[in-house]
Amino acid sequence: MIDRADDDAGAPMPCDPEALLACMRRRTQIAPRHLLAPGPDESQRRQLFEAAATAPDHGQILPWRFVVVPLEARGRLADAFEQALLERDPAAGEDERARARDKASRAPFLALAVVRERGDGQQHITLHERMASLGCALQNMLLMAHAQGFGAGLVSGLALRSGALASCFGLAAGERAVCFVAAGTPARRKPARQRPLPEQVASMLQGGD
Amino acid sequence: MIDRADDDAGAPMPCDPEALLACMRRRTQIAPRHLLAPGPDESQRRQLFEAAATAPDHGQILPWRFVVVPLEARGRLADAFEQALLERDPAAGEDERARARDKASRAPFLALAVVRERGDGQQHITLHERMASLGCALQNMLLMAHAQGFGAGLVSGLALRSGALASCFGLAAGERAVCFVAAGTPARRKPARQRPLPEQVASMLQGGD
């Protein structure tokens, strides 16, 4: 369609609307246990974060960051998941602990999304604006992972709010872990799900009195 | 690049990664006062909300919605903006009130983004997840508006948290107005701004002890 990727302000967009919508529709949530090697290589990972970095950012305060968990750090993440379980349930049995640990080994690409909620002297930029910016960054990463030919998904869970995870990732005061972004080769293709219709997501403000 | 927009699970993505990244980089914030007619037509507006509707949505609870403000309802919005100002500053003068009202007339496409924070019996899905989903929807709309050849921007402000605005838009208990999405023909082209580098948005969890 176009063979250049420059930023000329007057140039036509390199994606036409139909192709872009098809790309958005093709994106579907894949759970990390179904995301196998190979995952994005070094230059593809870089591209994922280049995509994230184009998110709208009111005041250019960059209120979020990502921490990639490479394969050699999955043991540390497993420890954090097990500790997080024990924070919630000190009596958790061996099986449950093994299941908690196991989650750390899934998906070749795994990155924690962290939002800075406060503590930067920019409180006129609300939590909602900060989270909207992070959401934009996440969507860019998901779309890009799909364009690269991978499957991807967002993962949340109770462990995200544990002291063990905050400590493992060195979260600062005012920071909060929001979700993991996982990407890899999908074990099986999954059809796109039915999406809400435009009339289900938007209504019209009536004019007059 | 591809001439169909179907959802075949096995088909290649209709956007290649470089074209998609160029598209993301081309998106830039345009303030509503610089967004002129013509704006997106009926079918383009529909496409904007089709794009929004493909956002990830944990539990498929659809925790957000949009309310479009058509031209014939701008007078009502002007009233709400003026009332919102008077809530904050009952002594606001005529000039200030006129400026508040004037903001309602900007941008041919204007829609309020609303998040449902609570009250739906789905509190296991946190505010952060709900806002991440809305952020994804917003990014899809911004990217789509650009692909359609328009400029677009997100707008927040103190009026969003006013009783006047909540009443104008019929917000339910548990709902919160997050921002406006504006789109139209940019008065002037604006070069894409410098974005943070991947190493500024992502770090690596160290392995080992």
Image: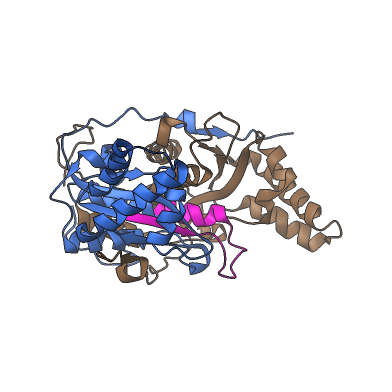
Chain colours: A blue, B brown
Q: Residue at x 59, y 57 (%)?
A: A126
Q: Is residue B151 visible?
A: no
Q: Quadrant of residue B59?
A: top left
On screen, residue B194 above or below A17: below
- Between A185 and A136, the one lying in front of the other is A185
Find the residue positioned furthest to the right. Answer: B91
Residue B187 as seen in the image, left or right of residue A55: right
Residue situated in front as seen by the camera: B138 or A74: A74
Residue drawn where x is 59% and y is 41% of the image = B69
Query: Is residue A1 highlighted in magenta?
Result: no
In the depicted structure, whether residue A117 falls above or below residue B198:
above
Report the number of numbered marks.
0
Does A122 lie within the magenta span? yes
Percent position of residue A139, x then y: 36, 49
Q: What segment carries the magenta color? A: A111-136
Give the left or right position of residue A120, taking residue B5 as reference: right
Q: Quadrant of the C terminus of chain B?
A: bottom left
Percent across and percent down for residue B78 are: 70, 48
Percent x, y for residue B121? Answer: 55, 28
